[in-house]
Image: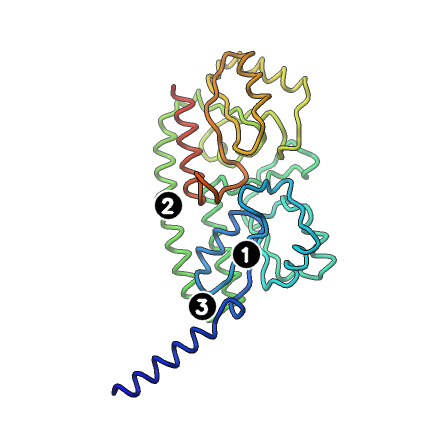
Amino acid sequence: MNLNVASFVLAVMTLTHAHLGAADKLQVMTLHPVATELARVIGGEIIEVTSLMAPGTNPHDFNPSPKQIENLAKADLVLAAGKNLEEFLPRFVKSTGSKNKVLEIGNSVPTLKSNDEHHGFVDPHWWHSIKNMKTAASVVEQRLSQFAPGSQSLFANNRKNYVSKLDSLEKWAAKEIGKIPREKRKLVTSHDAFGYFAHNYGFRVYPIGGLTPADKPSSKKVADLVRLIKSMNVKAVFAENMENPKVLEMMMTETGSSMGGKLYADSFGFPPVLNYEEMYRHNVTTIVEGLTR
């Protein structure tokens, strides 16, 4: 190839790249930090990702404004956590006819049941299982490939690299949790968010509240849990980063247990946990340190 031809090809490639600006990319809107991470990691520069929630927002309490609903309707693809977490979604789909462009990622992974009738007995916190995250990565890859079939190989490679990191995280977590004797794997938390984590690693979870921070415990439930903690000689209880630890502090006074630290249950993407891996490592390290003192 002579210099003139090479220059021409380079110029065409440059112009093509310039033309494919943000407005020409696949427009993806996300409704949960997990969905945001999966979209950005797997989609790469081919897509434009916009998170509807600000960092640190509790997804259980989130209700989009009319303007945000309008923006959702304009997106090419909407990625949600699913499993009834986004309670406004059925109304959004019905009012906009957007069923085909909404992917509830968590609906493709196994469901754990809860005792919370208000939420249909479905635990929506599926991302606390690394195995589920691997499945979710494949689900997002497949849906992005449907919208941008010319980028299938890119999406597949990005998903493969991400799953490789999850494999390493999974091995590390299993090794760390192995430091906790089976009889000490009792997790007292602010609300019922760690069922999938507990299922994977053989913990019993004793949540104070229900599936959402808004599900406040009755005085009888708190009293029963205090008696249970005493009888099981639980040494540490765990608060959550976006909740008031007042009830936990009262329980520590009543039981003689200590604060094991704060866990990240429903959100990440802000210091000190900027991504899924950092959230998972923080939670595992905090639980191991709290229960092996």
Q: Secondary structure at mark 3?
A: helix
**Residue closest to the eye, 76 or 203:** 76
Q: Is 166 located above or below residue 93 in the figure?
A: above
Could you tell me residue 46's position as x and y percent? 46, 65
Q: What residue is disc 1 on?
A: 50
Could you tell me residue 242's position as x and y percent? 55, 34
Q: Residue furthest left?
A: 2
Q: Amino acid at mark 1?
A: Thr
Could you tell me residue 22's position as x and y percent? 51, 66
Quadrant into which the N terminus falls: bottom left
Question: Residue 58's image quarter?
Answer: top right
Please tell me the numbered disc located at residue 167: 2
Q: Secondary structure at mark 1?
A: strand
Separation (CA) of disc 2 from disc 3: 24 Å
CB under 8 Å between callouts 3 and 1? no
Q: Earlier in the sequence, mark 1 or mark 2?
A: 1
**Residue drawn 58% across the image and 42% down it:** 57
Coloring applied to the structure: rainbow
Quadrant into which the C terminus falls: top left
Q: What residue is disc 3 on?
A: 151
Separation (CA) of disc 3 from disc 1: 20 Å
Q: Amino acid at mark 2?
A: Asp
**Residue drawn 37% across the image and 48% down it:** 165
